[in-house]
Image (cartoon, rainbow, N blue to C red):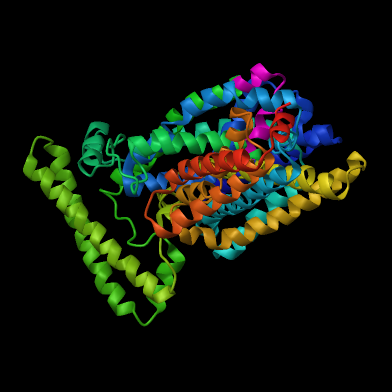
Amino acid sequence: MKWLDWAIVAAYLLYVIIDGLRLTKRSKEVEGYFLANRNLPWWAVGLSVMATQLSAITLVGTTGQAYADGMRFIQFYFGLPLAMIILCVTAVPFFYRARVYTAYEYLERRFDVKTRALTSCCFLISRGLSCGVIVAAPSVILSIVLGWNETTTILVMGLTTTVYTMFGGVQAVTWTDVKQMVIIFVGMSVCLFVIIGQFPSNVSIGDAMTLAGATGKLMTVDPQFNLNETYTLWSGLIGGMFLALAYFGCDQSQVQRYLTARSESEGRTSLLMSAFIKIPMQFLILFIGVMVFVFYQFKDPPMLFKADDRARVERSDARAEYDAVNAQYEQALEARREAAARYAGDHASSEARAGFIAADARVKEARARGAALAERVTGKRFNDVNYVFPTFVTTYMPAGVVGLIIAAIFAAAMSSIAAELNSLATATVIDFYRRHFRREASDAHYLRVSKMATAAWGGFACVVALYASRLGSLIEVVNRFGSYFYGSLLGVFVLAIGTRRATGTGAFAGLIAGVAAVAVVGATTKISFLWYNVVGCVVVVVVGMAVSLATGSKREITEQTK
């Protein structure tokens, strides 16, 4: 990076830290620290909801996902608007009128303390793992920009953000999110403009769309019904809707956002705002990844984007074999570049189209051989999809724009990490420490414990981050982690809100059965992780109702519905 890029990144980080610390002065009580005294406007809450979900994973992992797999990922969000409408009618009124700090407090009122404790525990595990993945994403950027190894960058990014979050409250997090969303939108728009501007002079945006379409990168709707396929119309509408219902309705990191709104109606509006802006925003980010793919039709991408693994292979005894594979790869790139130019110049030629598709397939085959060699040398699973966009930005973006994009990625990372750690601390303190260990204490005491909990979860997230980048596309990894628990959590809230006959014993048994069922399905089948949410929810409701009717006395059922 040039000095201008460093200046932009430094100015952004300095501003965010100073502004965040300034806002923390308003959070001296428990309600102010955790819920901003329930006094934030709907548009700020809505942007915070989006910022909490729009982590660096979205900017890094989604663009890399689109580079490798095209626009199919957009189907993941098709069920989101419907889920938000359902939540506006059900979850928001329940939580807001209950005046709770966490979503799981309501479950004790409806069922019992053991159900509240187990659901909160499931949230802490799933969100703690996901927070580690969120820490890993910006660390990918730093490892490329600074040339540090992943362990160093994870510790620098994770621990720095943890320290910042310890002194912040949800009010500081929310208003920082608002400013960071502006930076993200500006950064991504500028990025797309610059990418298209760097196409060869004889390649128009129409030519780029033709090249992307020939390789299937522009496919946005796959109508097949296949439980083993992650990105289809039906997995998005059904599995994606269940995931969105669980994430925005049962996950404390999201529930805590709209509980800060001034009123119930403003809480609803904030969710609807997020629902109908999210898909266009996600489309833009995916489209950037596709345009990076087109750009690399005319520029030579590295065979392996992950530089440290590439260096290990080059220093190993397999260097000669690597050079041979790389030579084949470079030849395939040259052939693809010529084929792309022919097809861009003659869209109507079926021969040119077939030649381009065949040339692209040979490039993929050579890359696959290089990846297999890297796995053999390093002894670890190789996946460099998360390194595609950072490598492109730092290699081809002009000075100033690099700094802006890096600042946008930091903005996404810091907003999400801060929100995640804050929600983890909230659930830890409210659902466990204050409920089971110290029921009466001053606000100052609970705030000290909250900061200690934030530090502990920050350390846990750093440990998870050390392994997360090896698991594949980070945007998939974070949703896969959540899907092991989210459907089951949703099932408990369906029992709580949707039926009067469910009992605490039934809900508790149903939750255990749901998590176990998802674990079995994940270990023994190839069903896509999006369907785990459906499996978990259905099992919890069925088992929960069966146990409730079999073991609950009429008096118990009556008392729990009062």
Q: Residue furthest top?
A: 265
Kindly indicate the quadrant of the structure image that contains residue 173.
top right
Task: Indicate left or right for 208 with 532 as reference.
Answer: left
Rendered view: 136 above or below 407: below
Asked whether residue 309 is in view, the answer is: yes
**Residue numbers of the magenta segment:** 253-268
Task: Indicate left or right for 312 with 254 as reference.
Answer: left
Kindly indicate the quadrant of the structure image that contains residue 345.
top left
Q: Position of residue 132 (x, y in %)?
A: 60, 54
Kindly indicate the quadrant of the structure image that contains residue 76.
top left
Query: What residue sits 77% from the left and 51% below the top?
Result: 453
Residue 3: say if magenta: no
Asked whether residue 13 is in view, the answer is: no
Instruction: Name the foreground residue: 256 vs 141.
Output: 256
Task: Indicate left or right for 293 with 80 as reference.
Answer: left
Query: What residue sits 64% from the left and 27% below the top?
Result: 45
Rendered view: 286 above or below 69: above
Query: What residue sits 49% from the left and 43% below the top?
Result: 533
Residue 265: say if magenta: yes
Instruction: Name the foreground residue: 558 vs 309.
Output: 558
Q: Position of residue 346 (x, y in %)?
A: 11, 37
Instruction: Name the foreground residue: 515 vs 138.
Output: 515
Rendered view: 229 above or below 27: below
Q: Position of residue 191 (x, y in %)?
A: 43, 38
Q: Quadrant of the C terminus?
A: top right
Secondary structure mainly formed by the magenta segment: helix
Task: Indicate left or right for 328 with 436 as reference.
Answer: left
Query: What residue sits 41% from the left and 35% below the top?
Result: 238
Q: Position of residue 100 (x, y in %)?
A: 75, 31
